[in-house]
């Protein structure tokens, strides 16, 4: 029988791509999601891409009774915990909602896992946990830092909670995956990033300008101490990230304790690199202007991605051109995202 992997928040951007990679690697996938920032259509498309079925439950992970029923009905081997609110700016406005939601879902999940003796969990963490004062490249051995927003603090707190849990329960296996900047989409163009309202992140904003939904991109700051004056990030193709999750699940099923991995390419690109590469590979003129800096942005951050390669045997394969091409392929085929 295939191993059963439960994805909390499984209908979202990174999770839906991970579902494809897991199904193709021979795992069975169970998704729980309350669709607060996603929709069931993404999973219908995952099924179309893979020709395999996914068990789908609409529920809030913080609803203990509902979650327990899912664990009772399935023999779950490992959980990937994607569920969580993730808008940096919104978290500054609504800190209590962010702490309540992101911590409650995690604690409830851990309690239900303990009740059903499920011992393996992979967590969607973020490069944000390195904080504001870390030096590049970010290495897993660096301390968790001082975050500039409640969203980031929830990631720091959840990492700590999970580590503490493995200290107390020697049977527990925790893998903390620190994502850098995921962009791109599945090659089919059938699944991709579908933010609600005005996108906060760079690539969905770029693709919405390209498809004519937004007038122009504002580049947040052109006077940073970087080669072209715009911020540098470590962009990673979401399918590479998805493969990283498969490796992390393989690892979690065979080990105990906590292990942390950066998932990035180790290569920094600037905002203007994205704009120029996107225009070039897709043959488009992208309207943009340089605007003021956005509060809280770090000038540059990228991963030391060597640990994941050494221990998980995982390395990102796609380059920036692939990422820009696949992001556009998704958006142009789905100008309104999953909405018809
Ligand atoms: N940017 C623009 N214009 C936009 C949007 C973004 O110039 O309209 C710039 C930002 O200033 C930044 C870069 O594009 O320099 C990337 O910005 P994103 O918002 O796409 O990503 P961030 O690096 O700010 O945030 C990401 C994740 C967070 C995570 C953070 C730190 O979205 O979840 O990395 O690791 F916390």
Image (cartoon, grey):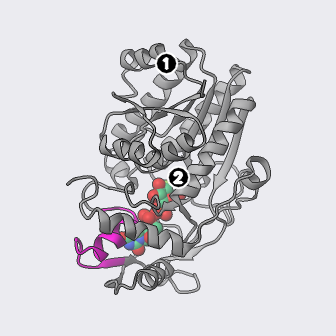
Task: Kindly report the distance in space between the C-alpha atoms of the residues bearing marks 2 and 1.
Answer: 37 Å
2 and 191: which one is in front? 2
**Where's residue 153, x and y in %?**
50, 45
- Provide residue 35's location: percent of width, then percent of height: 30, 39
56 relative position to 248: left or right: left
Q: Is residue 79 rendered to the left or right of residue 265?
A: left
**Which residue does the image show at 42% across and 59% down from the upper left?**
188
**Residue 44 horizontal/vertical position (percent):** 34, 42
Label 2's element? loop
Splitting the image into 4 quarters, where does residue 290 fall? bottom left
Q: Earlier in the sequence, mark 2 or mark 1?
A: 1
| Quadrant assignment for ligand 1 | bottom left
How crowded pointer 1 is (Cα within 10 Å; few <14, some 14-19, many 20+) is rated as few
Question: Which structural element holds mark 1?
Answer: loop
Give left or right: position of 218 versus 247. Answer: left
Question: Residue beneath label 1, please?
Answer: 74
Say whether marks 2 and 1 touch (CB < 8 Å): no
Residue at horizontal 48%, vertical 81%? 277
Report the span colored magenta. Answer: 199-218
Does the stretch in magenta take in 212?
yes
């Amino acid at each position: 029988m295939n191993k059963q992997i439960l994805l909390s928040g499984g209908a979202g951007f990174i999770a839906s791509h991970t579902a494809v990679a897991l199904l193709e690697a021979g795992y069975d996938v169970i998704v729980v999601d309350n669709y607060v920032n996603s929709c069931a259509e993404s999973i219908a498309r995952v099924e179309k891409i893979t020709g395999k079925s996914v068990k789908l439950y609409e529920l809030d992970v913080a609803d203990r009774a509902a979650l327990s029923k899912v664990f009772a009905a399935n023999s779950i081997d490992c959980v990937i915990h994607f569920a969580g609110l993730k808008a940096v700016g919104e978290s500054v406005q609504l800190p209590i909602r962010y702490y309540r939601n992101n911590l409650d879902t995690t604690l409830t999940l851990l309690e239900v896992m303990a009740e059903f003796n499920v011992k393996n969990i992979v967590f969607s963490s973020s490069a944000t946990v390195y904080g504001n004062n870390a030096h590049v490249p970010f290495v897993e051995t660096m301390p968790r830092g001082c975050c500039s927003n409640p969203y980031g603090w929830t990631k720091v707190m959840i990492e700590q909670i999970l580590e503490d849990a493995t200290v107390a329960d020697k049977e527990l296996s925790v893998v903390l995956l620190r994502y850098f900047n995921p962009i791109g989409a599945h090659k089919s163009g059938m699944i991709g990033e579908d933010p609600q309202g005005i996108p906060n992140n760079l690539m969905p904003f770029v693709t919405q300008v390209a498809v004519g939904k937004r007038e122009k991109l504002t580049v947040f700051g052109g006077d940073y101490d970087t080669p072209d004056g715009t911020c540098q990030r470590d962009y990673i193709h979401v399918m590479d990230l998805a493969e990283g999750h498969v490796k992390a699940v393989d690892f979690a099923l065979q080990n105990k304790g906590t292990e942390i991995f950066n998932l990035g390419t180790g290569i920094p690109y600037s905002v203007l690199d994205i704009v120029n590469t996107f225009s070039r590979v897709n043959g488009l003129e992208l309207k943009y202007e340089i605007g003021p800096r956005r509060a809280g942005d770090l000038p540059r951050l990228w991963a030391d991605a060597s640990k994941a390669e050494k221990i998980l045997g995982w390395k990102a394969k796609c380059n920036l051109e692939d990422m820009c091409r696949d992001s556009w392929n998704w958006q142009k085929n789905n100008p309104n995202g999953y909405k018809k």
